[in-house]
């Protein structure tokens, strides 16, 4: 029996079928391999590394362009997850007013953004 692909790691894009563990967060996922890499980076990080947003680092145009597709892919995954959560809320009887309030938007905005997805 083949395991279904339910989600992908938001960092390396590997599906749940190719990793040991996939931990879910609010609309994002991280695999055991990426957690291990993060732990190694944190343990070996010198205290003098400045904290700068990735897009504010000194990068070449090619470096920046190579990061656009993975960032867009992660954004698309988050959007798909958000849509799935909104569908779940609707299935459980959530009104557009309550869904909009939970998302910090009006009922009308929530309906316009998500009603075509049902």
Image (tube, rainbow, N blue to C red):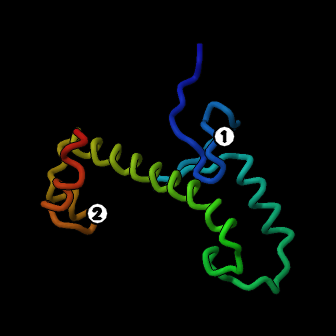
The mark found on residue 103 in the picture is 2
Q: Along the polypeptide, which appears first: circle 2 or circle 1?
A: 1
Q: Nearer the viewer, residue 56 or 61?
A: 61
Q: Position of residue 74 (x, y in %)?
A: 52, 54
Q: Residues within 10 Å of mark 2 (few under 14, many from 20)?
A: some
Q: Position of residue 11 (x, y in %)?
A: 63, 53
Q: Quadrant of the C terminus?
A: top left
Q: Nearer the viewer, residue 42 or 58?
A: 58
Work out whether 15 lies above or below 78.
above
Q: Position of residue 87 (x, y in %)?
A: 27, 42
Residue at which label 1 appears: 21
Q: Is residue 12 left or right of residue 90?
A: right
Occupied quadrant, residue 18:
top right
Say which residue appears at 68% left-offset and 66% top-offset: 62
Say which residue appears at 63% left-offset and 68% top-offset: 64
Occupied quadrant, residue 69:
bottom right
Q: Residues within 10 Å of mark 1 (few under 14, many from 20)?
A: some
Q: Secondary structure at mark 2?
A: helix
Q: Residue furthest front?
A: 61
């Amino acid at each position: 029996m083949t395991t279904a692909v339910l989600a992908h790691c938001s960092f390396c894009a590997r599906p749940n079928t190719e990793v040991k563990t996939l931990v879910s967060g609010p609309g994002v996922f991280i695999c055991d391999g990426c957690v291990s890499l993060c732990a190694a980076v944190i343990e070996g990080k010198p205290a003098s590394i400045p904290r700068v947003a990735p897009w504010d680092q000194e990068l070449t145009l090619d470096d920046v362009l190579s990061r656009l597709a993975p960032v867009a892919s992660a954004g698309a995954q988050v959007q798909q997850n958000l849509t799935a959560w909104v569908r779940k809320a609707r299935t459980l009887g959530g009104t557009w007013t309550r869904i909009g309030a939970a998302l910090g938007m009006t009922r009308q905005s929530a309906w316009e953004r998500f009603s075509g997805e049902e």
